[in-house]
Image (spheres, rainbow, N blue to C red):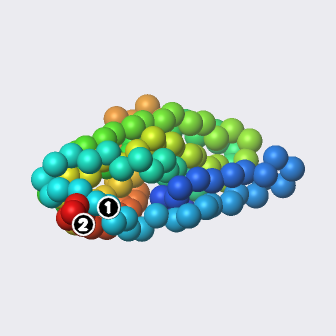
Amino acid sequence: MLDHLWSIVCQSSSIDDETNRLSLFNVIENISINGEEGQRILVPLQFDIVSSWLRKDISEPVHATMKITYTSPEGESILQQEIVFEITKTPLHRTRVHFPNIPVITSGCYKFIVDLKVGAENVWCTVATIPLFVKILKSK
């Protein structure tokens, strides 16, 4: 089995090769952009969603699939990405999912929903919801 420890949205992240220490840069909780409400805007801001996982039984390898769904303030799915990972040697594992931009349409609270499916099970379990507050400023 697998426990979700945390997930965070940041502009970039780095893992030191020698120490395996993780650095998170420019955590993203809100953005303000110029534009028009109601029109799709691709904000040219690359970002990562970094998650940490704990394998409960270190004698058992874990095969899992993580799904990240990015939703609008109305709950509409805008983006979705899945990654498959396996934990066989260590109790802790990190995942990093990269996105090239952030699409927005209106001001409000967007959400990144992190779901997990373990092994051959076909059941998704929501393990985290990360808010992103967006404010669209009227262009002059």
Whether residue 92 sits left or right of residue 103 in the image: it is right
Mark 2, Cα crowd under 10 Å, few <14 / some 14-19 / many 20+, is: few
Say what secondary structure mark 1 lies in: strand
The x and y percentages for residue 36 are 17, 56
Visible in this render: residue 98? yes
Picture quadrant of residue 67: top left
Q: Are marks 1 and 2 in contact (CB under 8 Å)?
A: yes
Q: Which residue lies under the disc numbered 1?
A: 33
Residue ID at (52%, 58%): 10
The x and y percentages for residue 40 are 21, 46
| Residue toward you, 25 or 35 | 35
Quadrant containing the C terminus is bottom left
Please tell me whether residue 77 is drawn above or below residue 50 in the rendered image.
above
Residue ID at (39%, 52%): 114
Alpha carbon distance from label 1 to label 2 = 6 Å
N-term mark: 1 or 2:
1
Residue positioned most to the front: 140
The x and y percentages for residue 4 are 51, 57
Circle count = 2
Residue ID at (31%, 41%): 79
Whether residue 96 sits left or right of residue 73 in the image: it is right
Amino acid type at mark 2 = Leu
Whether residue 50 sits left or right of residue 29 in the image: it is right
Residue ID at (37%, 65%): 31
The x and y percentages for residue 101 are 40, 45
Say what secondary structure mark 2 lies in: strand
Q: Which residue lies under the disc numbered 2?
A: 137
Please tell me whether residue 63 is drawn above or below residue 13 in the rendered image.
above
Picture quadrant of residue 127: bottom left
Amino acid type at mark 1 = Ile
